[in-house]
Amino acid sequence: MNSKAVFATVMVYIGCGLNNVFLEYTIKQDPGSGHLITFLQFLFIAIHGFIFTHKFGSIKPKIPYSVYFTLVVMFFLTSVVNNWAFNFNIPVPLHMIFRSGSLIANMILGILILRKKYKLSKYISVFMVTVGIIICTLVSSQQKSSICTDCSDQTDKNSMNQPQEEDKYFLFWWIVGIALLTFALLLSARMGIYQEWLASKYGKHPEEALYFTHMLSLPGFLIYSGSIYEHARIATYSEPFSVFFLSIPILWIYLIGNIITQYLCISSVYTLTTEVSSLTLTLIITLRKFFSLMFSIIYFKNPFTVYHWLGTVLVFTGTLIFSEVPAQLNELFKKKKKD
């Protein structure tokens, strides 16, 4: 790796890791803030891209606006639904593990849409990931969560304290959350296929795509303006935190930290796509996800049983097998040994 790749790798671990920390702090205090979080992330990246990528509108896009429309719709729905799932009794560790199932969705759509055929090792790895996710999902369904149970923005706080009501509605809203994650997973895979088509036809323009997918998605947040406004107020009236001579609401500190680290995470990943091989990038991202999951469990004291451990091992081992990391590392080791 050159110095640029090494720096980007470090920033992936720092940026993406800190992003999960700020996200979990925010979700624990305000579980319904998913739309606000997504909107602020999109707004920041759109403003940054308008200034530094689009040069205040002076640069003509290399891909037509009309072609971006389909990508924007899929990207917007995927991002919103993924964050919205937190409002339906989905804990952060389960959310992270479930999203690792993108391999399953990619394979299913690859077979159905692109008529692809895969090696036996691919099917084995997908089976491992599937079993791992099922184990973690079933175990998590038996656990109570402290976050919202009726999943409306007008939550009756008194009803949240009633154990009988919580027992009655918890499983239903948890199933809704799993359905949302499944939808987002399949849509994300479909978006990946569409991006492959864009790259083959118009070339690779990651910075431009990053900017336009976020900027063109902003009008969609008008649908959630009520939720965004309400949770922005919740953040504004949250517990104050003193910084030097200023008193800033603690939730806004978490939100700002989440926005900045999200951009740092995404931009570093985009840098690595041009500096290292796909094998190295897959390994870096997989290990980053694993470390973030472990940190979430240990630091935030999220419930994690032996069955969660089993599911996690299956998910990440299957991911590595799918990306052919062990096989290629073995070949690289043999080659160096011969030299």
Image (spheres, rainbow, N blue to C red):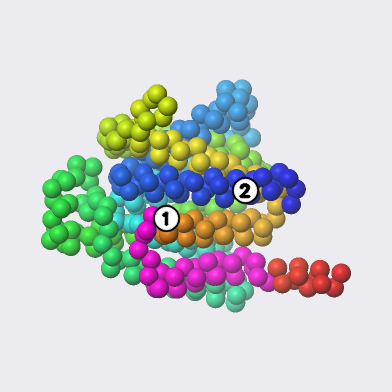
Image: magenta residue range: 299-328
Question: Contact (CB < 8 A) between labels 1 and 2?
Answer: no
| Residue identifier under label 1 | 299
Figure disc tally: 2
How much space separates mark 1 and mark 2, taking CA atoms?
21 Å
Q: Measured along the vertical axis of the image, is residue 308 above or below residue 45?
A: below
Q: Nearer the viewer, residue 42 or 264?
A: 264
User: What residue is disc 2 on?
Assistant: 10
Q: Position of residue 26 (x, y in %)?
A: 36, 44
**Kind of residue sitting beneath label 1:** Tyr
Name the kind of residue labelled 2 in the image. Val
Label 1 or label 2, whichever lies nearer to me, is 1
Quadrant of the image occupied by residue 170: bottom left
Q: Residue at x 62, y 42 (%)?
A: 206
Answer whether residue 303 is magenta in the image. yes
Q: Is residue 302 left or right of residue 3?
A: left
Q: Is residue 183 visible?
A: no
Residue 307 visible? The answer is yes
Residue 254 at x, y percent in the picture: 40, 39
Residue at position x 17%, y 51% in the image = 160
Packing grade of label 2 (10 A; few <14, some 14-19, many >=20) is: few
